[in-house]
Image: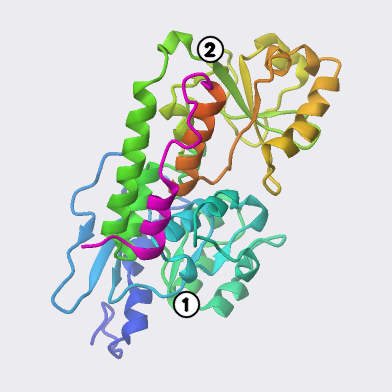
Amino acid sequence: MSGPDGATFERPTRREVVKGGGTLALGGLLAGCSGNSSQESSEAGTGDRTTDTEPSATGPATSDGTYSVTMEPVGTVEFETVPETIAPFTADYIDMLVALGHGDAVQSIWYRGRYKTLHYEELDGVSIDLDALTQLWSDGVSKEAFYEMDADLHLIDPHALTHWLKAWEQSDLTEVRENVAPFIGNLVFRQTDDWHNYRYYSLYEAFEKVAEMVQERTRFEAIRSIHDELTETVQARLSAPEERPNAALMFAGEEPEPFTPYRISGNGANKEHFQTLGIADAFSDTGIEGYSGSESLDYEALLEIDPDSLLLRYHREGKTREEFENSVLAHMKEHEVGSRLRAVQNDRVFRGGPIYTGPLHNLFMIERYAKCYFPETFTEAQLFDRERLARIITEGVAE
């Protein structure tokens, strides 16, 4: 075969076909990372922040079984077969693969402490071995780890490496793509980064893309049905919007102070469950922006707002409600200013949930916060069927 420069090359093997997809799209993306021209914006993405479904996002399987998946910012990746080993970066994408019955394919995570897995304990037969995953972050991200994993696919937004963490240069991406496997993915957990000037995907839009990558449309549809049923059930029983409490969503340590604010009203997969429940943003009309890596609040500033409730995120291992009350909440109740917050006085200080929220996290978060915020309305022990969900994950769906 002849390339565009006239060079000849061998027809690739099966695994090389999986690895070779997306080369031109990623090349265009990387060329546009450092420039400002309109051509570069076109190559890198749409430039707007829409989540509308794109046409012809996935090519139908051909007679020989090959298929393609299109996802910004990389573009189209072609597959000859379902990838057997996949290297994700953030835990939201790992949760998607677990949900689709492909947890065994997962090879990596950027930081183990950011992957909350307590919810798997409620799903019979569903688990993941965190210790078996390669942690990609260790004072940077080593290219050698990618060579050692030798995964079939990197389920990673390349900008996570070059722009978010600033761990790689564009040449590093090109090297790993050409020598190991393609990248595909979109950073979906938040939408506050100026560099993310290409299309965002909602949680279920990204989940659908991953289902296309591993050819699990039926499982995806079955889980989406559970999500839609839960959402409909919960929203039908909510009080009027003006009667619902507001919440300040923040990052906080073991003994919180200062706090880093997030905006519930903003976009991002890790806020969708709050929006499902119509929880109002306590920071609205305060001038406080969403997380940018710099802004912080002390207790005095928080007391001026005095939110109805607090949602506190904690970056280390997950805490049970009891552990949270005995550590974080106990500290706040003893704090001279913190103890004056009405959320603290009324015991409306809750765990803020995972930063990286996949579809399984999302189901449990909708249920958790429905029961936390509206305990007199949602008195059931469970709001969705764990057995049904676990069966879809572990056994699939009968045709």
Q: Determine which residue is flagged by label 2.
A: 285
Q: Is residue 387 magenta?
A: yes
Taking depth in this image into account, of 265 and 391 the one nearest to the observer is 391
Q: Quadrant of the N terminus?
A: bottom left
Chain part drawn in magenta: 374-399
**Residue nearest the observer in this picture, 338 or 399:** 399
- Toward which corner of the image does residue 247 lie, by quadrant? top right
Amino acid type of the residue that numbered disc 1 sits on in the rendered structure: Val
Would you place residue 46 above or below residue 148 in this image? above
Q: Is residue 153 above or below residue 351?
A: below
Q: Is residue 378 left or right of residue 146?
A: left
Magenta span has 292?
A: no
Looking at the picture, how far across and down is residue 276, in whole percent? 41, 29
Confirm or deny contact between disc 2 and disc 1 (CB under 8 A). no
- Kind of residue at disc 2: Asp
The residue at the far front in this view is 380
Any part of residue 44 in sight: no
